Image (spheres, rainbow, N blue to C red):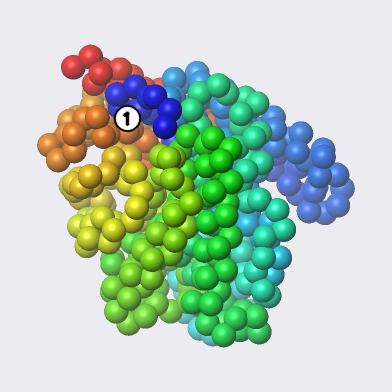
Amino acid sequence: MSALPLFPVTTVGSWPRPGAVLASWRALRSGEISPERHERAVDNAVREAVEAQHRAGVDLVTDGEQARDNFYSFVADKLDGVRLMTLAEMLEHVEDKEGFSRLLDTLDVPAFSIRNPTCVGRVRAREPLVLPDLERLRRHTGRPIKVTLPGAYLLTRAMWVPELSREAYDSKEALGRDVVAILREEVARLAAAGADFIQLDEPVLTELVFSQGQTRTFMCASLAARGDPSDELRWAVEMLGEVLASAAGVRTGLHVCRGNWSRDERTLLRGRYAPLAPWLAQVPVTQLVLEYATPRAGEVISPGDKELGLGVVNPRSEDVEAPEQIVARVEAALQVVPRERVFLNPDCGFGTFSARPINDAETAERKLAAMVEAARRLRGA
């Protein structure tokens, strides 16, 4: 693992996409430009995202997920048997159309601007999922690198639409086995290539414990969970363990939030992490990357023997948190976490969905700079 200072500052992953790369995405999909020309636009966007992190003073850099439509849908471009569908298109196939439509309205989710990877055949990898992202990022930074991947549980729940998936798989568990194999191989590639930090994103885990068995997250609206949330959590932990078995010697993290698709906090889940704690303790990761910058999260719980990626700024707000406010949040966390195990990060990404960023790049950079100043003060304390 790369040497990092006390209280390392990083991001959760996504960064607002500049207009040029969004236009390039549209032109690529319509066949107006070549993949090579689009790659140049992506490379420029990554460079801009990295430069912003460098200016702010971030210790552990990400590529801003500039090559992705959103944090999990991009796999459709890398996998056979997966089709990218807008939520409006999915509405035509889910069993409970009225319920799904009502869910999108309630959660403030734009049905035409967010795309979901949907299983329509046997799922096989045509190419590495994010190894090219790591290689591209290395051209723009000499600092330690974090690479993000959607977790196996998230992908399986998002991809499984029974009306479309059952021709290829007789159950979601069968689909999950192929998803695990693909992610495990990708983690092995990233570890061999020298990634400093591999983060798996599993935001759906909070939906299991905070929504009393009712689907509250549009990413899994097509899949009803088992009646007992513990069965789903056990399955998720098993899959995470299998994926991470290929990550020996690399710092790994598990990011769990409560949703990051709207600025309206009322539409997002709320509740302490305590119900998840026994399950998170079983996941063989180095670090838990958790959101704590809003009252919805409650007080900080101990991560046990793991590091804590402490969410200290809200990526959805226009206000930039003052360094002293961030310091106070960290000091409160130090009551239950040793200082050498605390990383500072936003609660979630700044640009979860490419066509609907949760914030602008200027505000995001100012929030990172405030985190860096807070870390500087904490190191001198």
Q: In the image as oriented, which residue stretches furthest toward the top?
A: 380
Q: Give the camera-side residue of 200 and 372.
A: 200
Say whether residue 180 is left or right of residue 231: right
Residue at x 29% of width, y 58% of height? 282
**Residue 232 vertical position relative to residue 292 in the rendered view, above or below:** below
Q: Position of residue 35 (x, y in %)?
A: 81, 44
Residue at x 33% of width, y 56% of height? 283
Residue at x 56% of width, y 41% of height? 192
**Residue 242 vertical position relative to residue 163 in the rendered view, above or below:** above
Q: Give the camera-side residue of 336 and 272.
A: 336
Q: Position of residue 119 (x, y in %)?
A: 63, 72
Q: Position of residue 134 (x, y in %)?
A: 60, 37
In the picture, the quarter occupied by the N terminus is: top left
The count of marks equals 1
Q: Is residue 76 visible?
A: yes
Say whether residue 297 is left or right of residue 284: left
Q: In the image as oriented, which residue stretches furthest toward the left?
A: 335
In the picture, the quarter occupied by the C terminus is: top left
Q: Position of residue 343 (x, y in %)?
A: 32, 33
Say whether residue 27 is left or right of residue 344: right
Residue at x 57% of width, y 55% of height? 185
What type is the residue that disc 1 sits on? Glu
Residue under label 1: 321
Q: Bin the neighbour count of mark 1 within 10 Å (Cα to Cα): few under 14, some 14-19, many 20 and up.
A: some
**Residue 150 vertical position relative to residue 252 in the rendered view, above or below:** below
Element assignment for label 1: loop
Q: Is residue 64 visible?
A: no
Query: In the rendered image, which quarter is residue 131 located in?
Result: top right
